[in-house]
Image: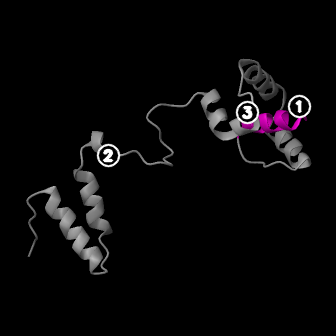
Amino acid sequence: MPLKLNNRRQLLELIESMEAAGKDATALRRELESLEPEAKRAPRRNSRFREEEETVEERLIRRVGHLFPNGITDELLARLFDIDKIHSLKELRAMCKEAGLSLSGDKHELAAKLVAKGIL
């Protein structure tokens, strides 16, 4: 016999009662999310998809900005772009490995790590 719920609140109450009884309500939580309008849904914190695409500068500030106390200036950004043109990803990773730095990140991030360390 199908269960008929009249509104979102009743579905939420059902989910809470199931979870309180120790039952799995994952499928019902997905249904609840699908009922919410797109505008009301909170974006996921670590979502790989962002509403607006980040600029290279914003991404560098977020990922390696802590390495530069004076911030990522236009001059530094231009220098990182120059390094990107001169060195391959493989070369930058080799330099980072030799310097004992993390190998994660794209060419700009690796270049920023090497510049912060004083290697480039």
Left or right of 26 on screen, residue 92? right
Q: Amino acid at mark 1?
A: Leu
Residue beneath the point at 28% across and 54% down: 33
Q: Earlier in the sequence, mark 3 or mark 1?
A: 3
**What is the x, y in percent for residue 80?**
77, 26
Residue 34: image location, x then y, percent: 26, 52
For label 3, the residue is 108
Image location (x, y in percent) of residue 107 = 74, 36
Residue sitting at 47 percent across and 41 percent down?
49
- Marks 2/1: CA–CA distance: 44 Å
Q: Report the side of 30 relative to 84 (left or right).
A: left
The answer to which image quadrant residue 105 occupies is top right
Q: Are marks 2 and 1 in contact (CB under 8 Å)?
A: no
**Residue segment shown in magenta:** 106-120
| Identity of the residue drawn at 21% across and 63% down | 12
Q: Is residue 82 left or right of residue 42?
A: right
Percent of width and height locating residue 113? 79, 39
Q: Secondary structure at mark 1?
A: loop
Q: CA distance from mark 3 to mark 1?
A: 12 Å
The disc at residue 120 is 1
